[in-house]
């Protein structure tokens, strides 16, 4: 014990001496001086070193080939699983990958730091080149005029625009677990490859819509995978290439080609909005959808995946009329005032309201919420019958084998956008994960005509949404947060839950309704008979 006290006294003396020494050094007129490294450190903070990189990420987020930091982690498992093509590789990333692997084939196969899937992809990409040449040749024969039988004018225009096209492509690609400079591909070579890919895409779309891909030896299964490949994040070319090719096709084919591209985008997405279905009979309508103005894309970084994303955002119909929004805000403010100062303070309200966690379609149904398909594409919630029941409207959605890849690529695309951009697909995925927990939830949505399940079972669909929801981060701006809050408000009304559960228990089946009607009828007849019996006796007595 004495030894321990001695040690503590020694330590306290040392600490006390150190403090006295520091104070003495400071008070003796010898203040601590900052050296050049300290000044450099403070200057870096002042000028904001590191901010340029983040702002650069927002700028490069639209460019083909750019990946945010979160998608590069864990050996690019996310990117390989969802964002790389399986059968139809196109774009500068494929060109760069093939060149890197082919020049260093043996080295790449022996390099343990390189994912073997990169080598396998490069080998598959080389095999697909013959198919791309066949598709491109068919397009040139069918759609280019006779005075340009081999597409010379279109290739010349592509080479003229290659400087601008290269600006739409990120200057490095994330391959081999590191960044690779894509300057290994020269301007002329890049122009030729973009020309080939553009013709391939257009002919594939034409043949797909006319069921003519069997001519190229493409089976139904491979066809479905190729359609998915055209909307992969890491399998894109600037849409400006497509626009340039359209300028040099036959004049009578211009409108038909544009219309087919729009129909192709609409047919491959799973959301439905009846108000956006059109015939696209005019050039102006087609150009407006494809973001074409005066022969050029309005957006500098447009490609097929971004067009699909824009269409889905329109399907959700997120925009709202300013006048309608103002009225809603005023009504909400008035309701909040009355609720806070009058309703919420009453004992009756406190007894009939209380927080309760609900997190599935079945639980929401027990709270009096019904699910219905939305014709205008909006996700909305509205209370009815004195706030006892509620309607949740959702856009009809088709679940099939390609749903996961499509949604994850759209989510990855939204992750590449600036922070102030809306993320409707990520918001929708998180919302569906909020609703779906088990296969019974999928069954209820399917019966309500909100979901069309083309998978083998409802359990597979529930698993799909749960997996996607767990792999996605919460969006910066949740487009459907107001709907979640309205649902939670509905679920906080105890009296509504009691009435809904009573109705579900006693009136959900037509047999219980008939039984109640029969019992009521029997009681009414019995009461009538009793009344007349008593009344007749009283009359006789009188």
Image (cartoon, rainbow, N blue to C red):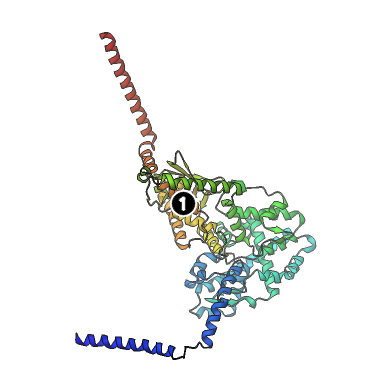
Q: Is residue 142 above or below residue 495?
A: below
Quarter of the image with the C terminus is: top left
Q: Position of residue 248 (x, y in %)?
A: 75, 61
Q: Is residue 25 above or below residue 266?
A: below
Q: Is residue 401 visible?
A: no
Specify the quadrant of the image occupied by residue 463: bottom left
Q: How many marks?
A: 1
At label 1, counting other C-alpha atoms closer than 10 Å, the crowd grade (few under 14, some 14-19, many 20 or more) is few
Q: Is residue 84 above or below residue 396?
A: below
Q: Position of residue 162 (x, y in %)?
A: 71, 70
Residue drawn at point x = 32 percent, y = 25 percent: 523
Q: Is residue 114 left or right of residue 532?
A: right
Outermost residue on the right side: it is 147
Q: Position of residue 303 (x, y in %)?
A: 63, 62
Q: Is residue 465 visible?
A: yes
Q: Is residue 95 left or right of residue 112?
A: right
Specify the quadrant of the image occupied by residue 67: bottom right
Quarter of the image with the N terminus is: bottom left
Residue drawn at point x = 67 percent, y = 67 percent: 196
Residue at which label 1 appears: 485
Specify the quadrant of the image occupied by residue 57: bottom right
What kind of element bears circle 1? helix
Which of 289/118 is in front? Answer: 289
Which of 86/16 is in front? Answer: 16
Q: Position of residue 120 (x, y in %)?
A: 53, 72
Which of 187/57 is in front? Answer: 57
């Amino acid at each position: 014990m004495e030894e321990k006290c001695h040690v503590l006294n020694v330590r306290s003396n040392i600490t006390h001496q150190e403090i006295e020494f520091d104070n003495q050094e400071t008070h003796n007129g010898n203040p601590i001086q900052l050296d050049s490294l300290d000044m450099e450190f403070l200057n870096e903070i002042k000028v904001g070193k590191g901010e340029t990189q983040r702002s650069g990420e927002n700028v490069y987020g639209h460019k083909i080939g750019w990946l945010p930091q979160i998608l590069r982690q864990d050996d690019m498992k996310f990117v390989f699983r969802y964002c790389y093509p399986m059968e139809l590789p196109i774009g500068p990333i494929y060109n760069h990958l093939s060149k890197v692997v082919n020049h260093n084939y043996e080295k790449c196969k022996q390099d343990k730091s390189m994912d073997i899937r990169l080598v396998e992809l490069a080998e598959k990409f080389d095999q697909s080149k013959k198919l791309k040449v066949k598709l491109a040749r068919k397009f040139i024969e069918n759609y280019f005029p006779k005075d340009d039988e081999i597409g010379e004018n279109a290739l010349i225009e592509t080479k003229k625009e290659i400087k601008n096209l290269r600006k739409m492509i990120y200057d490095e690609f994330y391959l081999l677990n590191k960044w690779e400079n894509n300057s290994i591909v020269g301007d002329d070579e890049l122009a030729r490859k973009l020309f080939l890919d553009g013709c391939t895409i257009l002919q594939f779309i034409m043949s797909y819509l006319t069921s003519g891909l069997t001519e190229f030896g493409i089976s139904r299964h491979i066809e479905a995978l190729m359609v998915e490949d055209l909307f992969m994040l890491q399998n894109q070319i600037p849409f400006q290439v497509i626009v340039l090719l359209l300028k040099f096709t036959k004049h009578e084919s211009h409108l038909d080609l544009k219309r087919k591209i729009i129909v192709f985008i609409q047919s491959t997405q799973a959301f439905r909005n009846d108000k956006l279905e059109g015939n696209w009979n005019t050039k102006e309508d087609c150009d407006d959808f494809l973001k074409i103005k005066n022969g050029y894309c309005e957006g500098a970084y447009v490609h097929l995946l971004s067009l699909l994303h824009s269409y889905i955002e329109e399907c959700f119909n997120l925009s709202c009329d300013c006048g309608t929004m103002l009225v809603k805000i005023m009504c909400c403010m008035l309701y909040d005032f009355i609720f806070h100062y009058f309703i919420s303070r009453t004992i009756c309200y406190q007894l009939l309201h209380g927080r309760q966690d609900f997190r599935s379609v079945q639980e929401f149904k027990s709270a009096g919420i019904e699910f219905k398909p939305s014709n205008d594409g909006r996700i909305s919630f509205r209370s009815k019958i004195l706030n006892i029941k509620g309607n949740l409207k959702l856009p009809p959605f088709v679940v099939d084998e390609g749903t996961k890849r499509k949604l994850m690529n759209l989510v990855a695309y939204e992750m590449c956008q600036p922070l102030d951009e809306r993320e409707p697909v990520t918001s929708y995925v998180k919302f569906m994960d909020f609703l779906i927990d088990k296969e019974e939830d999928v069954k209820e949505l399917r019966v309500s005509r909100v979901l069309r399940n083309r998978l083998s079972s409802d359990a597979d669909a529930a698993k799909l949404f749960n997996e996607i929801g767990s792999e996605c981060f919460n969006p910066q701006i949740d487009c459907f947060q107001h709907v979640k809050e309205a649902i939670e408000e509905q679920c906080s009304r105890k009296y509504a839950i009691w009435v809904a559960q009573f109705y579900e228990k006693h009136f959900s089946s037509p047999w219980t309704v008939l039984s109640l009607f029969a019992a009521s009828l029997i009681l009414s007849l019995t009461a009538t008979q009793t009344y007349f019996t008593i009344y007749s006796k009283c009359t006789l007595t009188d």
